[in-house]
Amino acid sequence: MMIPNSPYAPPHNVLLLSCMDLRLLDETVAFMDGIGMINRYDHVILAGASLGACYDGLPHWGQTFWDHVDIARELHDIREIYILEHRQCGAYLKLLGFAAWESEELEALAHAEVASRLKSQIQVRHSDLGVRAFLMGLSGAVIELAI
């Protein structure tokens, strides 16, 4: 499903979790602006996005994510978390030891699996928060992942 550039946005603030990849910083802002979220989201950046937040080998990264969720709830009344994954993510290679991008379908499944794992953790800690996940291509095109 393509996410259209539309003025529609949920009637609440969100927290965006994205990857640190320098190739997509402008595209990430353009995506959020394009869906009507200008000045309506807190932004947490971890290598690998959801992988960075739930990777067992880096528990301090996960704690950083949870600390940000807590303060975003307190300060900005977020009601939803958006997870923005991206294609050809180097963190998947570095942390998991494989290049998931050899097949676009397998790559999307790998991102959806990790995002789904994080969604489950979010729902255990904050059952009232919604979670959506997206996958950005290197061109900036975005699809929504089923998680």
Image (cartoon, rainbow, N blue to C red):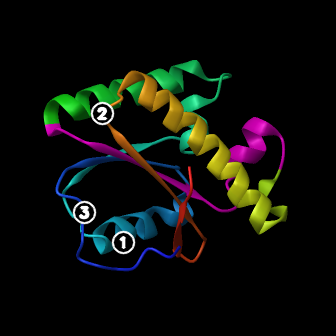
Label placed on residue 128: 2
Please, what is the three-letter code of the amino acid marked with disc 2?
Answer: Asp
- Comparing 12 with 38, the one in front is 12
Q: Is residue 54 magenta?
A: no
Please, what is the three-letter code of the amino acid marked with disc 1?
Answer: Ala
Q: Which residues are magenta?
A: 76-98
Q: Which residue is mark 3?
A: 37
What's the distance in space between the residues labelled 2 and 3, CA to CA? Answer: 20 Å
Q: Which image quadrant is residue 66 in?
A: top left
* Residue 87 placement (x, y as % from top left): 65, 62
Q: Which residue is mark 1?
A: 30
Label 1 element class = helix
Q: Nearer the viewer, mark 1 or mark 3?
A: 3
Q: Nearer the viewer, mark 2 or mark 3?
A: 2
* Residue 67 placement (x, y as % from top left): 35, 24
- Comparing 122 with 86, the one in front is 122
Label 2 element class = loop
